[in-house]
Image (cartoon, rainbow, N blue to C red):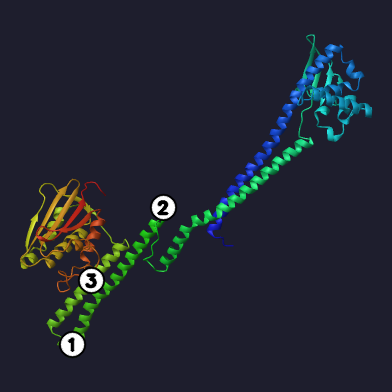
Amino acid sequence: MKIMIKYRLFLAMLAATGAVVVCMFLIMQWSIGRGFLSYVNTIEQDRFGKLSELLEQSYSSRGGWDFVRRDPSAWPELLVASLPREGGDLERLERLGRFERQEKRLRRPPPIFAGFSGMKPPARFAHRFEARVFLLDADRRSIAGPPGAPERDAIKSIRSGGKVVGYLGMKPRQRLTDTHQLLFVKKQKLAMAMIAAVMLLISAAISLPLANRLVLPIRRLAASMHRLACGEFGTRVAIGPEDELGQLARDFNALALSLEKTEQARRRWMADISHELRTPLSVLRGEIEAIQDGIRQASPESMRSLHVEVMHLGRLVDDLYQISLYDVGALSYRKSLLDLRAVLVHALDSFRADFAAKGIELRVDLAPGSELQIFADPGRLHQLFVNLLDNSLKYTDRGGQLRVRLGRREELATVEFADSAPGVTPEELEKLFDRLYRVESSRNRATGGAGLGLAICKNIVEAHEGAIRALPSPKGGVAIAIELPLTGSKT
């Protein structure tokens, strides 16, 4: 059976409260019973001490225990005389008079005093003080009280003239038996049960709205998550207080924003790829159909045009393949210790003639001193420098300038490619490394490029634990700054 989290939380809080209330109820029940029994025992101990004093006085005044053995009413009189003086001496004497009148009328002591003659008292009086106290002589022979072996730990000696003349003992009380005592304890336990029931009802009344309030943000978040799973990436949730739910709401909004941007990038990627592939394919199709229809002749010039489009399509496919390999982590790198200056000089030498043909001045500033040794893949670094040099060659105006500077800053090797106009806006600088991004004012298909060259450069630099940035060039163009870690022992 499916139970909503609101009711689970409600039941959990109610169960916790119920367990506390039940434990408290049981402890209080035990405490009341034990406490009241302890109170009654304390009163009996006071009476026990009073009875001991009366026995010592009686023994001293009468010279022995014969008055107890011969007079059946003597022991009950002593027990009555030991009662607490709640109403003073007058009330105690009145109670004693009532007992004497009753005893004369019945010609025998009440059942609770039956033990003084050796008879066992009725069961309902077996736990009374009068039925548990007994008197022994100096030789520990029974004089009065109930039959049975005396309890050594509850015996008090009776002295007269400095010597022990007898012993007063009392069997310990095991439970409450008096009607009034039991009624009092019962009322207290009933009151505790009613308090426990009221506490449970109050807990239930509070727990349900509290559980509903606690679950409300989770319910809202669940509904938003459902919409997000259905493709509504613009879904957002209100951020609550600074707690776990608030942090969860912030993480949800960050996830939704990331998915929204990813979906936008995917759609833009698909549109750009379709556009980039459609153009060379359309040109190839038009050229081939023109030759088939006899509009154009299959001359070297037309073959050259077809070859250019095929090469452009091939470069685009190669770049896409490089990007896909990087995304899946399958782009291989064969790293070794090498001199960064040598790799850069080799790439520059292969472009000097092209820059000279376009009238672009190539200025190279290499850091003097020792080798700049790094742990890298020479082929990937050559590809990095070739892509940057090719970009500058394509997008720098004729008669411009490109300055390549190699330096060192602490434990980093720095390489900078700064060309002259045209430049790009600061907003566009942040997007130059995005895939298929091209600045329309300067980059177009006529000059080549599908906007993947700088994205590949970024992947290569990050694979070498470096950093690459696009900055405004002092010459009016774009400056690409690269930082690579130097090492002499990394393997």
Question: In this view of the protein, can residue 118 be seen by the observer?
Answer: no
Residue 173 falls left or right of residue 108 = left
> Mark 1 or mark 2: which is in front?
2
Camera-side residue of 291 and 31: 31
Q: Quadrant of residue 426?
A: bottom left
Disc 3/disc 2 C-alpha distance (Å): 50 Å
Q: Residues within 10 Å of mark 3 (few under 14, many from 20)?
A: many
For marks 1 and 2 on the same chain, the one whose residue lies earlier in the sequence: 2
The amino acid at mark 2 is Pro
What secondary structure is marked by label 3?
Answer: helix
> Mark 1 or mark 3: which is in front?
3
Q: Which residue is mark 3?
A: 316
The residue at 20%/62% (across/down) is 427
Q: Residues within 10 Å of mark 2 (few under 14, many from 20)?
A: few
For marks 1 and 3 on the same chain, the one whose residue lies earlier in the sequence: 1
- Name the quarter where the N terminus is drawn: bottom right
Camera-side residue of 206 and 127: 206
The amino acid at mark 3 is Leu
Disc 1/disc 2 C-alpha distance (Å): 72 Å
The amino acid at mark 1 is Ile
Instruction: List x then y, in percent, for residue 348.
Output: 11, 60
CB contact under 8 Å: marks 1 and 3: no
Instruction: List x then y, in percent, for residue 335.
Output: 24, 55
Q: Which mark is residue 100?
A: none
CB contact under 8 Å: marks 1 and 2: no
Q: Which residue is mark 2?
A: 241
Instruction: List x then y, in percent, for residue 342.
Output: 14, 55
Q: Which residue is mark 1?
A: 291
